[in-house]
Amino acid sequence: MKLPLDRYDRLPEALAGIAPRDIRAVFPNPSLVFIEGEETQPLFVSTLLHGNELTSFSVLQHLERTCRGARPPRSLIVFVGNVGAAAAGVRHLDDTPDFNRIWADGHSPWHDMAQDVMDEARRAGLFASIDIHNNTGDNPLYGCVNALRPADLQLAAMFAPVGVYYLNPPTTQSIAFSRICPAITVECGKTGSAEGNAAAIRLVEEAMRLKAFASAPPPPGTLDVYQTVGRVLIPEDVSFGFGEPDAQLTLRQDLEALNFRPMAAGESWAETQLSGMPLRVVDEHGHDLTGDFFRRDGRALRLVQQVVPSMITRDRQVIRQDCLGYLMRPI
Ligand SMILES: [Zn+2]
Protein backbone atom coordinates (compact mmCIF):
# COMPACT_ATOMS: atom_id res chain seq x y z
CA MET A 1 0.00 0.00 0.00
CA LYS A 2 1.25 3.48 -0.85
CA LEU A 3 -0.12 6.45 1.07
CA PRO A 4 -1.01 9.56 -0.91
CA LEU A 5 1.36 12.51 -0.50
CA ASP A 6 -0.11 15.51 -2.31
CA ARG A 7 1.95 18.34 -3.76
CA TYR A 8 1.00 22.00 -4.12
CA ASP A 9 2.79 25.11 -5.37
CA ARG A 10 1.07 27.45 -2.92
CA LEU A 11 -0.96 27.38 0.29
CA PRO A 12 -4.67 27.31 -0.69
CA GLU A 13 -6.57 30.52 0.22
CA ALA A 14 -9.35 28.36 1.69
CA LEU A 15 -7.06 27.80 4.71
CA ALA A 16 -7.95 31.28 5.91
CA GLY A 17 -11.51 30.62 6.96
CA ILE A 18 -11.39 27.13 8.42
CA ALA A 19 -11.04 25.51 11.83
CA PRO A 20 -8.23 22.97 12.33
CA ARG A 21 -10.77 20.13 12.36
CA ASP A 22 -11.80 21.08 8.80
CA ILE A 23 -8.26 20.79 7.46
CA ARG A 24 -9.18 17.91 5.16
CA ALA A 25 -11.40 20.23 3.14
CA VAL A 26 -8.13 21.92 2.10
CA PHE A 27 -5.58 19.12 2.51
CA PRO A 28 -7.35 15.75 2.20
CA ASN A 29 -3.97 13.97 2.56
CA PRO A 30 -0.51 14.65 3.98
CA SER A 31 0.96 17.29 1.68
CA LEU A 32 4.11 19.09 0.60
CA VAL A 33 3.73 22.72 -0.42
CA PHE A 34 6.55 24.28 -2.46
CA ILE A 35 6.54 28.08 -2.31
CA GLU A 36 9.10 30.03 -4.29
CA GLY A 37 10.88 32.87 -2.52
CA GLU A 38 13.64 35.42 -3.16
CA GLU A 39 16.43 33.26 -1.70
CA THR A 40 16.13 29.90 -3.41
CA GLN A 41 17.55 27.58 -0.75
CA PRO A 42 14.36 26.50 1.01
CA LEU A 43 13.35 26.60 4.65
CA PHE A 44 11.45 23.44 5.60
CA VAL A 45 8.47 23.99 7.92
CA SER A 46 6.92 20.87 9.42
CA THR A 47 3.33 21.18 10.67
CA LEU A 48 0.65 19.02 12.29
CA LEU A 49 2.80 15.96 12.94
CA HIS A 50 0.59 15.81 16.02
CA GLY A 51 -3.04 16.50 15.17
CA ASN A 52 -4.02 18.20 18.43
CA GLU A 53 -1.07 20.63 18.58
CA LEU A 54 -2.42 23.66 16.83
CA THR A 55 0.31 26.29 16.92
CA SER A 56 1.52 24.92 13.59
CA PHE A 57 -1.97 25.39 12.15
CA SER A 58 -1.73 29.11 13.09
CA VAL A 59 1.62 29.21 11.29
CA LEU A 60 0.03 27.66 8.19
CA GLN A 61 -2.70 30.29 8.22
CA HIS A 62 -0.15 33.05 8.77
CA LEU A 63 2.01 31.85 5.88
CA GLU A 64 -1.00 31.61 3.57
CA ARG A 65 -1.92 35.23 4.41
CA THR A 66 1.58 36.62 3.94
CA CYS A 67 2.48 34.59 0.84
CA ARG A 68 -0.81 35.44 -0.91
CA GLY A 69 0.34 37.39 -3.95
CA ALA A 70 3.79 38.13 -2.48
CA ARG A 71 7.01 36.15 -2.72
CA PRO A 72 8.43 35.28 0.70
CA PRO A 73 12.06 36.33 1.37
CA ARG A 74 13.12 32.66 1.11
CA SER A 75 11.64 29.61 -0.60
CA LEU A 76 9.59 27.36 1.63
CA ILE A 77 8.74 23.69 1.69
CA VAL A 78 5.82 23.21 4.05
CA PHE A 79 4.90 19.70 5.19
CA VAL A 80 1.33 19.26 6.39
CA GLY A 81 1.44 16.02 8.34
CA ASN A 82 -1.29 14.11 10.13
CA VAL A 83 -4.43 15.70 8.68
CA GLY A 84 -6.51 12.68 9.76
CA ALA A 85 -5.53 13.20 13.40
CA ALA A 86 -6.06 16.97 13.09
CA ALA A 87 -9.59 16.35 11.77
CA ALA A 88 -10.26 14.14 14.80
CA GLY A 89 -8.52 16.52 17.25
CA VAL A 90 -6.08 13.87 18.52
CA ARG A 91 -2.29 13.42 18.62
CA HIS A 92 -2.54 10.43 16.29
CA LEU A 93 -5.35 8.08 15.31
CA ASP A 94 -5.40 4.69 17.03
CA ASP A 95 -4.74 2.85 13.78
CA THR A 96 -1.92 5.10 12.53
CA PRO A 97 1.54 5.66 14.00
CA ASP A 98 2.70 8.81 15.76
CA PHE A 99 3.85 11.02 12.85
CA ASN A 100 6.88 12.14 14.86
CA ARG A 101 8.15 8.57 15.25
CA ILE A 102 8.32 7.51 11.59
CA TRP A 103 11.49 9.24 10.38
CA ALA A 104 13.92 6.34 10.81
CA ASP A 105 14.09 2.58 10.38
CA GLY A 106 10.75 1.00 9.96
CA HIS A 107 8.65 -0.56 7.27
CA SER A 108 5.14 0.75 6.95
CA PRO A 109 3.30 2.97 4.48
CA TRP A 110 3.89 5.86 6.91
CA HIS A 111 7.63 5.25 7.04
CA ASP A 112 7.64 5.18 3.22
CA MET A 113 5.80 8.51 3.12
CA ALA A 114 8.32 10.04 5.56
CA GLN A 115 11.09 8.69 3.34
CA ASP A 116 9.52 10.37 0.29
CA VAL A 117 9.39 13.66 2.21
CA MET A 118 13.05 13.22 3.23
CA ASP A 119 14.05 12.50 -0.38
CA GLU A 120 12.37 15.70 -1.59
CA ALA A 121 14.05 17.66 1.19
CA ARG A 122 17.46 16.23 0.42
CA ARG A 123 17.08 17.02 -3.29
CA ALA A 124 16.04 20.58 -2.47
CA GLY A 125 19.21 21.22 -0.40
CA LEU A 126 17.53 22.81 2.62
CA PHE A 127 18.64 25.97 4.41
CA ALA A 128 17.12 24.75 7.70
CA SER A 129 14.19 22.81 9.12
CA ILE A 130 11.66 23.86 11.79
CA ASP A 131 9.19 21.35 13.25
CA ILE A 132 6.41 22.97 15.29
CA HIS A 133 4.81 21.35 18.37
CA ASN A 134 2.96 22.06 21.60
CA ASN A 135 3.18 20.23 24.90
CA THR A 136 0.63 19.28 27.51
CA GLY A 137 2.20 20.57 30.75
CA ASP A 138 3.10 24.08 31.81
CA ASN A 139 6.51 24.73 30.21
CA PRO A 140 8.32 27.79 29.00
CA LEU A 141 8.86 28.03 25.25
CA TYR A 142 11.89 26.01 24.24
CA GLY A 143 13.62 24.64 21.18
CA CYS A 144 15.03 21.12 20.86
CA VAL A 145 18.22 20.47 18.93
CA ASN A 146 19.83 17.18 18.00
CA ALA A 147 23.27 18.54 17.13
CA LEU A 148 25.29 21.05 19.16
CA ARG A 149 26.37 22.94 16.01
CA PRO A 150 26.42 26.75 15.90
CA ALA A 151 23.59 26.93 13.32
CA ASP A 152 21.25 24.62 15.23
CA LEU A 153 21.94 26.50 18.46
CA GLN A 154 21.37 29.80 16.68
CA LEU A 155 17.93 28.60 15.53
CA ALA A 156 17.13 27.58 19.12
CA ALA A 157 18.28 30.95 20.49
CA MET A 158 16.19 32.76 17.85
CA PHE A 159 13.13 30.99 19.28
CA ALA A 160 13.69 31.11 23.05
CA PRO A 161 16.47 31.39 25.67
CA VAL A 162 15.93 27.74 26.70
CA GLY A 163 17.04 24.76 24.63
CA VAL A 164 16.99 20.98 25.01
CA TYR A 165 19.46 18.62 23.38
CA TYR A 166 18.27 15.05 22.80
CA LEU A 167 19.11 12.01 20.68
CA ASN A 168 16.28 9.80 21.82
CA PRO A 169 13.81 8.85 20.47
CA PRO A 170 15.88 8.62 17.26
CA THR A 171 12.82 8.47 15.01
CA THR A 172 11.75 12.13 15.14
CA GLN A 173 11.58 14.53 12.21
CA SER A 174 14.22 16.86 13.59
CA ILE A 175 16.76 14.08 14.23
CA ALA A 176 16.34 12.88 10.64
CA PHE A 177 16.58 16.40 9.23
CA SER A 178 19.55 17.32 11.43
CA ARG A 179 21.57 14.97 9.19
CA ILE A 180 20.91 17.19 6.14
CA CYS A 181 20.59 20.73 7.54
CA PRO A 182 20.34 22.76 10.76
CA ALA A 183 17.14 21.49 12.37
CA ILE A 184 15.03 22.36 15.38
CA THR A 185 11.82 21.27 17.06
CA VAL A 186 10.00 24.12 18.76
CA GLU A 187 7.77 23.44 21.75
CA CYS A 188 5.32 26.32 21.81
CA GLY A 189 3.66 25.82 25.21
CA LYS A 190 0.13 24.46 25.46
CA THR A 191 -1.93 24.32 22.30
CA GLY A 192 -3.78 27.58 21.71
CA SER A 193 -1.18 29.64 23.59
CA ALA A 194 -1.12 33.10 22.00
CA GLU A 195 2.49 33.54 23.14
CA GLY A 196 3.47 30.22 21.56
CA ASN A 197 1.72 31.04 18.28
CA ALA A 198 3.40 34.45 18.09
CA ALA A 199 6.84 33.00 18.87
CA ALA A 200 6.53 30.27 16.22
CA ILE A 201 5.45 32.80 13.59
CA ARG A 202 8.29 35.13 14.59
CA LEU A 203 10.85 32.31 14.30
CA VAL A 204 9.65 31.24 10.84
CA GLU A 205 9.67 34.87 9.66
CA GLU A 206 13.18 35.47 11.03
CA ALA A 207 14.52 32.22 9.58
CA MET A 208 13.12 33.20 6.17
CA ARG A 209 14.87 36.58 6.37
CA LEU A 210 18.17 35.19 7.67
CA LYS A 211 20.81 35.27 4.90
CA ALA A 212 23.27 32.88 6.52
CA PHE A 213 23.96 31.27 9.89
CA ALA A 214 26.76 32.57 12.10
CA SER A 215 29.85 30.37 12.25
CA ALA A 216 30.17 30.77 16.03
CA PRO A 217 27.67 29.50 18.63
CA PRO A 218 25.27 32.01 20.24
CA PRO A 219 27.04 34.31 22.76
CA PRO A 220 27.07 33.18 26.42
CA GLY A 221 23.89 34.06 28.27
CA THR A 222 21.60 33.90 25.22
CA LEU A 223 20.76 30.19 25.37
CA ASP A 224 20.69 27.69 28.26
CA VAL A 225 20.87 24.15 26.89
CA TYR A 226 19.77 21.14 28.90
CA GLN A 227 20.19 17.44 28.28
CA THR A 228 17.64 14.86 29.35
CA VAL A 229 19.03 12.31 31.81
CA GLY A 230 15.90 10.39 32.77
CA ARG A 231 12.18 9.85 32.36
CA VAL A 232 9.99 9.71 35.46
CA LEU A 233 7.33 6.98 35.45
CA ILE A 234 4.58 6.08 37.87
CA PRO A 235 4.09 2.29 38.06
CA GLU A 236 0.75 1.22 36.59
CA ASP A 237 -0.57 -0.24 39.85
CA VAL A 238 0.05 2.92 41.88
CA SER A 239 -2.83 5.39 42.25
CA PHE A 240 -1.71 9.00 42.28
CA GLY A 241 -2.90 12.55 42.60
CA PHE A 242 -1.59 16.09 42.84
CA GLY A 243 -2.17 17.20 46.40
CA GLU A 244 -5.03 14.69 46.99
CA PRO A 245 -4.01 13.03 50.29
CA ASP A 246 -5.94 9.76 49.78
CA ALA A 247 -3.96 8.61 46.72
CA GLN A 248 -1.18 6.04 47.20
CA LEU A 249 1.22 8.58 45.73
CA THR A 250 0.56 12.25 46.50
CA LEU A 251 2.66 14.40 44.20
CA ARG A 252 3.23 17.98 45.25
CA GLN A 253 0.61 20.23 43.79
CA ASP A 254 3.01 22.73 42.21
CA LEU A 255 5.20 20.14 40.49
CA GLU A 256 4.18 21.28 37.00
CA ALA A 257 5.16 24.86 37.87
CA LEU A 258 8.73 23.69 38.48
CA ASN A 259 9.41 22.79 34.84
CA PHE A 260 12.81 24.14 33.78
CA ARG A 261 13.61 25.38 37.32
CA PRO A 262 16.57 23.79 39.10
CA MET A 263 15.57 21.70 42.13
CA ALA A 264 18.17 21.03 44.82
CA ALA A 265 19.10 17.68 46.36
CA GLY A 266 16.77 16.99 49.28
CA GLU A 267 13.72 18.68 47.77
CA SER A 268 10.56 16.62 48.03
CA TRP A 269 8.47 15.53 45.04
CA ALA A 270 5.79 13.48 46.74
CA GLU A 271 4.54 11.66 49.81
CA THR A 272 3.39 8.08 49.85
CA GLN A 273 1.58 5.62 52.07
CA LEU A 274 3.23 2.70 50.29
CA SER A 275 6.44 1.00 51.23
CA GLY A 276 9.26 1.04 48.68
CA MET A 277 9.63 3.58 45.89
CA PRO A 278 6.44 4.29 43.95
CA LEU A 279 8.27 6.35 41.26
CA ARG A 280 10.67 5.07 38.63
CA VAL A 281 13.37 6.85 36.65
CA VAL A 282 14.68 5.24 33.47
CA ASP A 283 17.28 6.40 30.99
CA GLU A 284 16.88 6.44 27.22
CA HIS A 285 17.70 2.72 27.02
CA GLY A 286 15.17 1.79 29.69
CA HIS A 287 17.82 1.19 32.40
CA ASP A 288 16.58 1.88 35.90
CA LEU A 289 18.17 4.96 37.50
CA THR A 290 15.64 5.51 40.28
CA GLY A 291 18.17 5.25 43.11
CA ASP A 292 20.38 7.89 41.50
CA PHE A 293 17.58 10.44 41.68
CA PHE A 294 15.11 9.61 44.47
CA ARG A 295 15.31 8.36 48.06
CA ARG A 296 12.76 7.70 50.80
CA ASP A 297 12.73 9.96 53.85
CA GLY A 298 9.84 8.72 55.98
CA ARG A 299 6.80 9.21 53.75
CA ALA A 300 8.56 11.75 51.54
CA LEU A 301 10.28 11.05 48.22
CA ARG A 302 13.27 13.36 48.01
CA LEU A 303 15.80 14.18 45.29
CA VAL A 304 19.25 12.66 45.68
CA GLN A 305 20.89 15.23 43.44
CA GLN A 306 20.14 18.57 41.79
CA VAL A 307 18.02 18.23 38.64
CA VAL A 308 15.95 20.39 36.34
CA PRO A 309 12.49 18.87 35.74
CA SER A 310 10.80 19.36 32.38
CA MET A 311 7.58 18.44 30.63
CA ILE A 312 5.96 17.49 33.94
CA THR A 313 2.28 17.18 33.18
CA ARG A 314 -0.87 16.74 35.27
CA ASP A 315 -2.67 15.10 32.35
CA ARG A 316 -3.51 11.62 33.69
CA GLN A 317 -3.72 10.05 30.23
CA VAL A 318 -0.29 11.37 29.23
CA ILE A 319 1.19 10.22 32.56
CA ARG A 320 -0.24 6.71 32.08
CA GLN A 321 0.60 6.39 28.36
CA ASP A 322 3.93 8.22 28.33
CA CYS A 323 5.45 9.53 31.55
CA LEU A 324 5.13 12.06 34.36
CA GLY A 325 7.99 14.13 32.97
CA TYR A 326 11.74 14.31 32.44
CA LEU A 327 14.84 15.08 34.49
CA MET A 328 17.52 17.23 32.88
CA ARG A 329 20.96 18.65 33.50
CA PRO A 330 22.47 21.79 32.03
CA ILE A 331 25.14 21.21 29.37
ZN1 LIG B 1 4.09 17.18 19.29
Image (cartoon, rainbow, N blue to C red):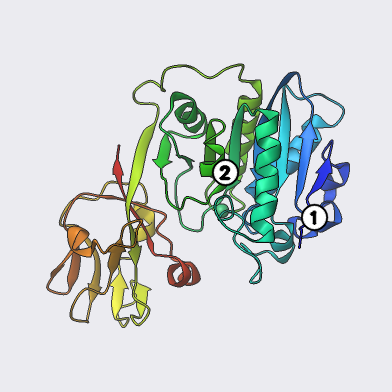
Task: Tell me which corner region of the image, top left, top right, bottom left or bottom right, holds residue 163.
Answer: top left
The C terminus appears in which quarter of the rendering? top left
Q: Which residue is mark 2?
A: 196
Q: Is 92 displayed left or right of 291 in the figure?
A: right
Q: Total marks drawn? A: 2
Q: Amino acid at mark 1?
A: Pro
Seen as rendered, the residue at the extreme left is 298
User: Residue 199 placed where, x, y %?
Assistant: 58, 37
Q: Secondary structure at mark 2?
A: helix
Q: Amino acid at mark 2?
A: Gly
The N terminus appears in which quarter of the rendering? bottom right
User: Residue 112 placed where, x, y %?
Assistant: 68, 53
Q: Disc 1 vs disc 2: Cβ atoms closer than 8 Å?
A: no
Q: Is residue 125 above or below residue 262?
A: above
Q: Secondary structure at mark 1?
A: loop
User: Residue 115 placed where, x, y %?
Assistant: 65, 47
Sequence order check: which comes first, mark 1 or mark 2?
A: 1
| Label disc, if present, on residue 4 of the rendered structure | 1
Q: Is 104 displayed left or right of 252 in the figure?
A: right
Q: Residues within 10 Å of mark 2 (few under 14, many from 20)?
A: many
Question: Foreground residue, 161 or 110?
Answer: 110
| Label disc, if present, on residue 18 of the rendered structure | none
Q: Is residue 186 visible?
A: no
User: Residue 106 placed where, x, y %?
Assistant: 57, 58
In space, the residues marked 1 and 2 are separated at their CA atoms by 31 Å
Which circle, 1 or 2, is nearer the viewer?
1
Question: Is disc 1's CB within 8 Å of ligand 1?
Answer: no
Q: Residue at x 65, y 61 (%)?
A: 108
Q: Is residue 288 above or below residue 184?
A: below
Q: Residues within 10 Å of mark 1 (few under 14, many from 20)?
A: few
